[in-house]
Image (cartoon, rainbow, N blue to C red):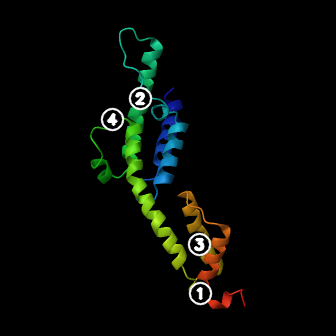
Amino acid sequence: MASSSAPNQANITASINSIPMLNDTNFKAWKENFLIVLGVMDMDLVLRTDLPVDIIEASTIEDIDLMEKWERSNRMCMMIIRKAIPEVFRGSMSPDIHTAIETLAEVEARFAKNEKAEIGTIPAKLTSKKYQGKENIREHIMEIFHLAARLRALKVDLSEKLLVHLVFNSLPAQFDISR
């Protein structure tokens, strides 16, 4: 029987280790990966449901079972979150937070500020990007499209015409098609 749980333990460890360490630039990917891992492991109950009612003498077996599952889900989520965020950030978190959903909300609030800063810097990169002739022209254009995709991910859409205009403006005069 012990051998059948070993692959399960290995899968759990591999899944948890697949969550990247959170940093200033990867919050969205981190959160998506975190939620997928918890969902696959069936540990996301705490993120999907509210805290069950307190157990009292009149509580049913179902109530007790739900509370135990919710508490286990919360405990596991908190351990996984702590493992996937830098220690310096853990120390700055509010000590009044005891649930994974509250912790995730605090982390999200902190990184929303970074998202706003990124919304400000990407357009500047797009408008100032110039082809230097050192890289492949295709790579240069793909970098511009990558910046535009990052903006779209931040819910800032650029029209196709504007994007084409930005690409042509980034190229030297020898690529001018208006002549």
Q: Is residue 82 above or below residue 3?
A: below
Q: Is residue 153 left or right of residue 82?
A: right
Residue 113 lies, in percent from the top left, at 40, 57
Mark 1–mark 3 distance (CA, rounded to whole Å): 15 Å
Looking at the picture, which amino acid does disc 4 mark? His
Q: Residue under circle 2? A: 72
Residue 29, disc = none
In this orientation, which residue lies closer to the viewer: 146 or 2? 146
- Earlier residue among tags 1 and 3: 1
The mark that comes first in sequence, 1 or 2, is 2
Residue positioned 64% across, 80% down in the render: 168
CB-based contact (under 8 Å), mark 1 and mark 2? no
Quick one: label 2 or label 4, which is nearer the N terminus?
2
Q: Quadrant of the C terminus?
A: bottom right
Closer to the observer: label 2 or label 4? 4
58 is higher (above) or lower (below) than 54: above
Q: Residue at the spot x=44%, y=60% of the render?
A: 116
Mark with earlier residue (3, 4)? 4
Question: Spatial distance from mark 3 to mark 4, Cα to Cα?
Answer: 43 Å
Crowd rating for badge 2 (residues with CA inside 10 Å; few <14, some 14–19, many 20+): some
The secondary structure type at the circle numbered 4 is loop
Q: Say which residue label 3 marks.
A: 144
Q: Is residue 22 visible?
A: no
Circle 2 SS class: helix
Q: Mark 1 points at which residue?
A: 133
Q: In this view, does 75 lie to the left or right of 131?
A: left
In x, y percent, where is residue 162? 63, 72
Q: How crowded is mark 4: few (under 14 residues within 10 Å), some or many (20 or more)?
A: few
Task: Point out the frontmost of discs 3 and 2.
Answer: 3
The residue wearing badge 4 is: 98
Amino acid at pointer 3: Ile
